[in-house]
Image (spheres, grey):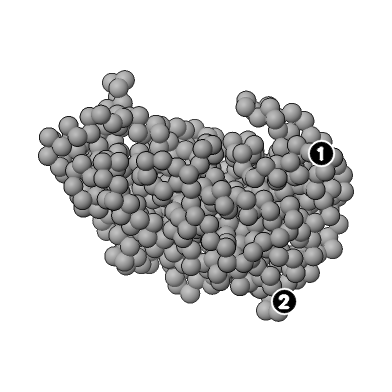
Amino acid sequence: MTLRSTASRRARAALTPALSLLFVGSLLAVGAVPAQSATAAAPAPAAPETIVPGAAEDISWSSCETEGAEAFDCATIEVPSDYDEPQGATTSVAVTRLRALDQENRIGSVLVNFGGPGGPGVSTLHLLGEDLFDASVRERFDIVSFDPRAVGTSDPATCFPTAEAEQDFLTSGLALPLTRAENARFLGEAAALGTACTVFGGDRIATASTANVARDMDVLRQRLGDDELTYVGYSYGTLLGATYAALFPDNVRALVLDGTVDPRAWTGPADGELFGTRLRQAEAGTETYGEFVRLCAEAGERCALNALGDPAEVVEDVYAALKEEPVEIPLGDGTTIEVGYADVVTQVFFSMYGTAGWPDLAALLAELAVLADVVPSSAAQALDEGPSIQELLRRLGLLEDYASIGGSLASLCVDADFPGRPWSYPRKVAALDEQYPHFGLFRGWVGVHCEFIAAQDEDAYTGPWEQTTQEPVLVIGTRFDPATHYDFTAPYAALWPDARMLTVDGWGHTTVGVSECADEAIGRYLVTLEADDGTVCQQDLVPFAPGTLRDDARPTLPAPRVPVLPGTAAGGGS
């Protein structure tokens, strides 16, 4: 690992959480400085022969202390901080499992990464685990997840001495810059954040590459007693899966890779291009949002925006009004909350992750249109029978605590390549926003704070990405995915000798809980290792439709836990 010394600066104002935690899914798309890595030009390397102390030991499981996780076991394992020094210092990785229902016919463990970087695996599995997979998977596999190194309840990469100091920092800064003066302030805040993360968490960031997370997974595989890895990765988890297969091509049993990230776009080289541009999230979000307003318009009275006019025009008017002046929303306890342009753009983007919340998003935008005076006050009568704006904020997860940013920055800041010229961002972001209004501004700034983090992981892996694993892998893409563009799916599949591609013809980020057809295909593959290439599954829930094809309530993968209002957070994991 390498930790470059840098002049410490006193953290003044903060980079808003809306831009510091992004994902994901799911990507938490933050940014990074160039990582020094062992990039090869020929075939992917064979599995290293590093002997890791304790890799063959059983895991000491115990009951989880978290309320509501009674069905799960929890543990902590120690892995080398730096695999170049396997006998040296260690770091803790938190692990949890849900045991197979049929232990007598148990196949093994299925390891799950829910996205990120920075997405917690332990708490997300506790939330979704019992309903995450088809019944056949639940019966035959222990379902296991973990908080990657530097994240959550593993040894975390922190950017401040205390959680209170971090909260103060994050809630005092600029949300999104809209003027030349704000651009300069925004860059200063990004520099302050990058410096703080280097000072307080640089040692952990410098060993947090995705390659080291993959090495941790191989240690975990061994300690679980599995000869080969069975793995399901969502969003950023598809990058982790590709990295694992590149490092350990002979240790793979089955890989489900859902919501693909093109690893070549992720790691670069940047060649002066913004990280946010390479990930195409502004483009993907714009396309998915186009479906939101289209389906809303077709839904008639089932979409609240139609009561005020053309949905697309109403929302644009809301954006324009909030750029001029934010609105104050009374919370019912004598206090108010200020909602501005950046808050609404952030909420709209992340609401594209799951279609179940689209009717509530439409209702919230309609209420904001009235509060911002972009429609006649008489129009409010058409909204009187709906939920209050406070209830809509609760449903959309805007009245919760915020999440830490250090774990989200760690892997990405040592994996990816970036322009290296922070002062060029305003011009490039403006061009992206011209092409993809609102979302270009929101996603274009992604990565700027990592330009100021002076930590590198020399063990980061940046290619080659052509895989040698001979086992079939299942690659999944959703047609309108706002976080991982569908156009990444086929090129990602082409990296594998035997990839079977499945498309969900629908909307949102990844397939968790949205398609019974996809659930069955995933279950069949994990149990039997059989999958068809070119399968197209329909989404069970059509946004704004009066009913659903599904009778049972299924959880969905949470959108990134991204704070978007002062002192609050949008709910979910990565």
| Residue 246 in the figure: left or right of residue 318 | right
Q: Earlier in the sequence, mark 1 or mark 2?
A: 2
Amino acid type at mark 1? Gln
Q: Which residue is mark 2?
A: 43
Q: Nearer the viewer, residue 194 or 353?
A: 353
Q: Quadrant of residue 361?
A: top left
Residue 334 can be seen in this image: yes
Could you tell me which secondary element the residue under label 2 belongs to?
A: loop
Q: Quadrant of residue 386?
A: top left
**What whole-number distance in Å separates the C-alpha atoms at marks 1 and 2?**
39 Å
Q: Which residue is mark 1?
A: 103
Residue at x-position 62% and y-position 27%: 68
Instruction: Say above or below: 269 vs 448.
Output: below
Residue at x-position 76% and y-position 44%: 140
Q: Position of residue 533 (x, y in %)?
A: 62, 67
Instruction: Say above or below: 151 vs 242.
Output: above
Amino acid type at mark 2? Pro
| Residue 105 in the figure: left or right of residue 193 | right
Could you tell me which secondary element the residue under label 1 belongs to?
A: helix
